[in-house]
Amino acid sequence: MQATLSRRAFVSYATRRKLVPYAYVAPAMALFALLMLYPMIAVFRYSLMDGAIIKRNPTFVGFANYVANFENPVFWQAVGQTLYFTSLSVIFHLAIGMGFALLLNSPLVNPTLRSLLRTLYVLPWLFTAVIIAIIWRLLLDPEGVINAILMALHVVGHKVEWFSSTTTALDALTFVNVWAGYPLYMVSLLAGLQGVPKELYEAAGIDGANAIEKFRFITVPQLTPIIISIALLDFIWTMQVFPLVWTITGGGPIYSTEVMSTYTYKQAFADYDFSMASSSAICILLMSLSATYFYVKHQKAQ
Amino acid sequence: MTKRSRLKSLAPTALTYLGLAVGLVYAGFPILWMLFASLKSNTEIFELPPRLLPRHFTLEAYFTIFADPIKVRFFVNSYLVSGVVTLLTVLIAILSAYAFSRYSFRFKALLNVFVISTQTVPPITLLIPYFGMVVAFRIFDTYYALILTYMVFTLPYAILLMTGYLNTLPKELDEAVLVDGGSSWTALWRVLVPISIPGIVATAVYTFLLAWNEFLFALTLTKSMEMRTVPIGIELLMGQHAYEWNQMMAMSVLGSLPLLVLFLLAQRYFLAGMTAGSVKA
């Protein structure tokens, strides 16, 4: 107490004024240091060791864990499937989100109906991944309602095992993820559409542009900044997908839905090989950071 | 009007409404199916031909859940952890947001980039060192483990949302306090916070949603049934009673309820925040 008081007397008003913002950000920055900076360094260190966390004195092995991962065909299968799942998700999120936003923005829809439908269309976004997983496991069960409908319509001739066949599991998972993720695009694009100046469409109408041309030459360019930032964020987050895959298929059958995070999780918490898992985790981090680089650059440009 | 031209003018309206109806089925059918399956008996769920509405309404699944202390505990845990995380996150975010919004200081741009990029770090990358840390701090399988680690993904959003909100308020409001000789602390809590309630509500709702939905950390950093949260509880139920579908659906309904209520209450602020801050799905 004495020390603080005497120090305060020496520190000038101007210096104290300068220190004020640091005091306000201090709690958040302390937490970030503990929960972000330190763990990042730790996970990188683990990835260069053999038997991190488990062994008392783990040995330094350089990039051996990375090499072991790169020589594992399942690692590359997981990378490929992650990119497949992510790219398809982003494309369909954008297409469905854009479709719903355009429908809701149509002048033919009255405002009350618009806000009611907007609320209903946003709902999938509110559900926990595990709940989404369980709903779709029921719907897409071989004995479930979707098979019953598809068979009644003669689209499929037998009960399809959507999640337990190696040929359909990844696409079925992607389908579920599309359902869970389009609302973010819809809400953002709808807000974007409402911000496009009406005069642009009127002027184009006078010049004889049809609806498709208006969309192509006015709507899309006006929305491009929004589309780029959401698609990049969605790409980064979808690449990190875990709960949905873990609860529906757990990466199976026979690695057919293994993604980077389930692959890493199994190394850490099924095999207890935290060093191998850390090297895989660093690979996911690098994939995310490369996309983040573009995201931050894009945000700054705006 | 000729028949043909009337048809032509009706076509866009008809197509728009058809599209909206398809959208409603796509978004709503799975949710309705969950709701009504939770009100069926377990044998009725797979009856053919499938029916959306139950033949015999029953609350049996809900009674079974409320009669099981462990399942009730999942909900208590989720409310407790999410509540405390929300409180701490909002408090710390208000302090940081005030500095970001009202002061210019060295490292500000760097810290800003740091906050933004923190949103994109994969949880699985952090999970491995967190596991080591939580064991070392002797907080494995406790509320503290979840509350502490959840802050890493709630804080960046909360800071961004709050900073965005404070930026919309005129600087003159709080500067008047400073000119009158008041401290920045007074300016923040007596002037800015009371008029920032909408922003704080949006931030709190969003933080609660993130914490409530968390899966990976809860799965790994807790172990005993007494410490499990709702998402993990549902996942365990799926493994244990693979055929108790009506109970799993009832758990899902109960697990979605707080988010639906909060969302409907705070929707106006929330959607604005969602579009402004590009919020995590």
Image (cartoon, helix red, strand yellow):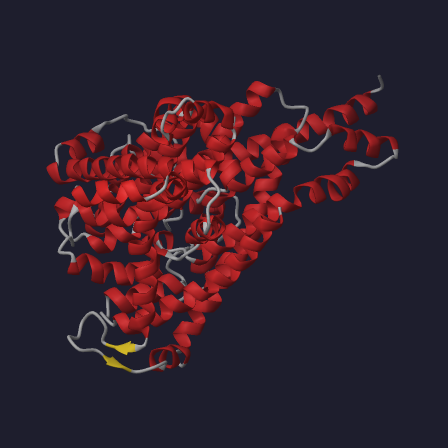
Instruction: Give the residue furthest to the front.
Output: A10
The location of residue B181, given as percent across then percent down, is: 39, 24
| One can see residue A92 in this view | no
Residue B135 vertical position relative to residue B58 in the rendered view, above or below? below
Question: Considering depth in this image, is B258 or B149 the residue closer to the camera?
Answer: B149
| One can see residue A58 in this view | yes
Instruction: Give the residue furthest to the top.
Output: B1
Residue A64 vertical position relative to residue A241 in the rendered view, above or below? below
- Compared across the picture, whether B172 is left or right of B247 comes to right
The location of residue B233, given as percent across then percent down, is: 22, 45
Residue A275 vertical position relative to residue A241 in the rendered view, above or below? below
Quarter containing the C terminus of chain B: top left
The location of residue A112, given as percent across then percent down, is: 56, 19
Q: What residue is rendered at 47% in x and 37% in y? A: B101
- Compared across the picture, whether A99 is left or right of A132 comes to right
Quarter containing the N terminus of chain B: top right
Query: How many numbered marks does the figure carry?
Result: 0
Q: What residue is rendered at 56% in x and 38% in y? A: A188
- Compared across the picture, whether A29 is left or right of A292 comes to left
Q: What residue is rendered at 31% in x and 41% in y? A: B211
- Compared across the picture, whether B220 is left or right of A83 comes to left
Dividing the picture into quadrants, the one containing residue A67 is bottom left
Question: Considering depth in this image, is A80 or A148 the residue closer to the camera?
Answer: A80
Instruction: Give the residue furthest to the right.
Output: A207
Residue A231 vertical position relative to residue A184 in the rendered view, above or below? below
Dividing the picture into quadrants, the one containing residue B74 is top left
Q: What residue is rendered at 41% in x and 35% in y? A: B98
